[in-house]
Image (tube, rainbow, N blue to C red):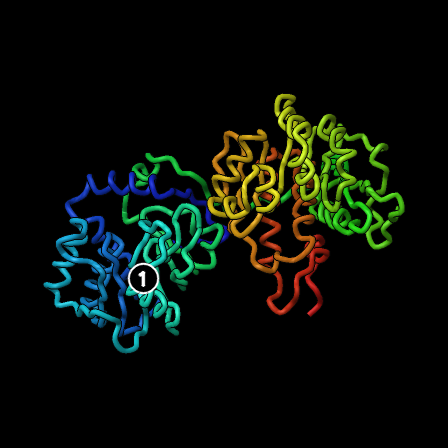
Amino acid sequence: MQTITSDTHQFLHGITQTRQIEQLAAAQLPPHALMQRAGLAVARLALALAPHAQHIWVACGPGNNGGDGLEAALHLSRWGKQPVVTWLGHPDRVPADTAAAYQRALAAKILFSAEPIGEFDLCIDALLGIGTQLREPHQRMANWITRLNTSAVPVLAIDVPSGLHADTGQTTALHVQASHTLSLLTLKPGLFTAHGRDAAGTVWLDTLGVDPAGLNSVPPIARLPGRAGQITRPHASHKGTFGDVAVVGGAPGMTGAALLAASAALHAGAGRVFVALLDDNAITVDTQQPELMFRPVQALDLAAMTVVCGCGGGTAVSACLPQILATSSRVVLDADAINTIAKETTLQAALLDRHTRQTVTVLTPHPLEAARLLGVTTAQIQGDRLTAAQTLSQRFACTVVLKGSGTVIAAPGQLPVINPTGNARLATAGTGDVLAGMVGARLATGLSAFDAACQAVYNHGQRADDWPASQVLTASRLASSTPPAP
């Protein structure tokens, strides 16, 4: 068993893939053994999380998730605890493994109750697991979920919190808010994107002793990246070693966005950073950051630079986008560049044509911008973020960074990555511009588009995770990774 942290490199399997692995594993074991292992794993984690707990409520549903809970109650009872089981199943209408677990619990004289009674030291959510279809729970289950969520004690969810979709991270309006989640056999992508991170609490994994070869026989659908690499700077290097980044954006009234991207590129390691503001009356020098070099976009050698385009670009960006798409070998498209492309089919064709010329493109949309590109609603994007990012990457043949809780990075021919770092402090103006600049800096050093995006997104989120809890995070501080004075 392991706890999942931002440093963890691990493959993610969806519901279909997990079911396949489950069937393969069960076929190699005695009857009911896999569920018994699951129950033992849950009981062990419960004991580790709350070693002094005596009264434990195990809320069980009618499926195999409930069976895991029954097996957990059995072990907890043997170890001197006092579990109380509420069960929504019927012994004649449940899967065979769960029926066997019920009979074992009866034989062990586990206390069953129609409703949770008294106070508890720990609660275990074994209601739905990965079987949920995102239907709102009926009254009795709804009452139990409400009771779990209003309890003042830890809640351990089995596999996924009830009401959370294991593939997408979407939730029913009423769902379990777990303190800890023990994912069994495989890690599920829904635990790490959309609402998953809020609902799951600390995530643990137990592969139940299944041979890794069995786990690897079914391909994953995504992965957690593990800790991102850092740029190394050999002594025998110079500014040209780390490439040039040109930030094109900053229309009238929005120059700050371009400056944030430029500052982020500078502090993320780019050799030189140029700024082409789309405001004729804008500044020509930043006295706070004199390293930034201001140029008209017409004066830039776009073919030799990594271009970050769109940050605060407004409608003015449409005039220079055709040239950038046609000439630059490495491009990061953000914000208004994405919005402009979404409106103009000729620019969409130019974007797709970049792939045929073997140039590098990274799109960094937030959900609304992604929805505009695909011609769907934001709700549809958020309803399945993993699929949305893959669809975008395939349609435009480029690397896509779909921002949000559990940012998804997708590219043709690559296993998608769900980023584990970052928190709600990033929900403030300008942090997306900072990310675009960081991606640009990574591209300029010569990394592939996919690796540059994965590293930049990870480090962007890690800066927010390391930020002092008592201090407000601003985009300008994030760009330079300089926390405020205490």
Residue 413 in the figure: left or right of residue 248: left
Q: Nearer the viewer, residue 467 or 110?
A: 110
Image-quadrant location for residue 441: top right
Position of the N terminus, as image quadrant, is bottom left
| Above or below: residue 439 compared with residue 98 | above
* Number of numbered discs overlaid on the protein picture: 1
Residue 164 can be seen, yes or no:
yes
Q: Which residue corresponds to the image point at 43% horizontal and 60% vertical from the top-left?
A: 201
Q: Nearer the viewer, residue 4 or 60?
A: 60
Image-quadrant location for residue 363: top right
Q: Residues within 10 Å of mark 1 (few under 14, many from 20)?
A: many
Residue 401 placed where, x, y %? 58, 41
Q: Secondary structure at mark 1?
A: strand
**Residue at the farthest bottom position:** 118
Image-quadrant location for residue 66: bottom left
Name the residue tied to disc 1: 125
Residue 311 placed where, x, y %? 72, 45
Position of the C terminus, as image quadrant, is bottom right
Residue 268 in the figure: left or right of residue 419: right
Residue 238 can be seen, yes or no:
no
| Above or below: residue 13 compared with residue 104 | above
| Above or below: residue 141 compared with residue 212 | below
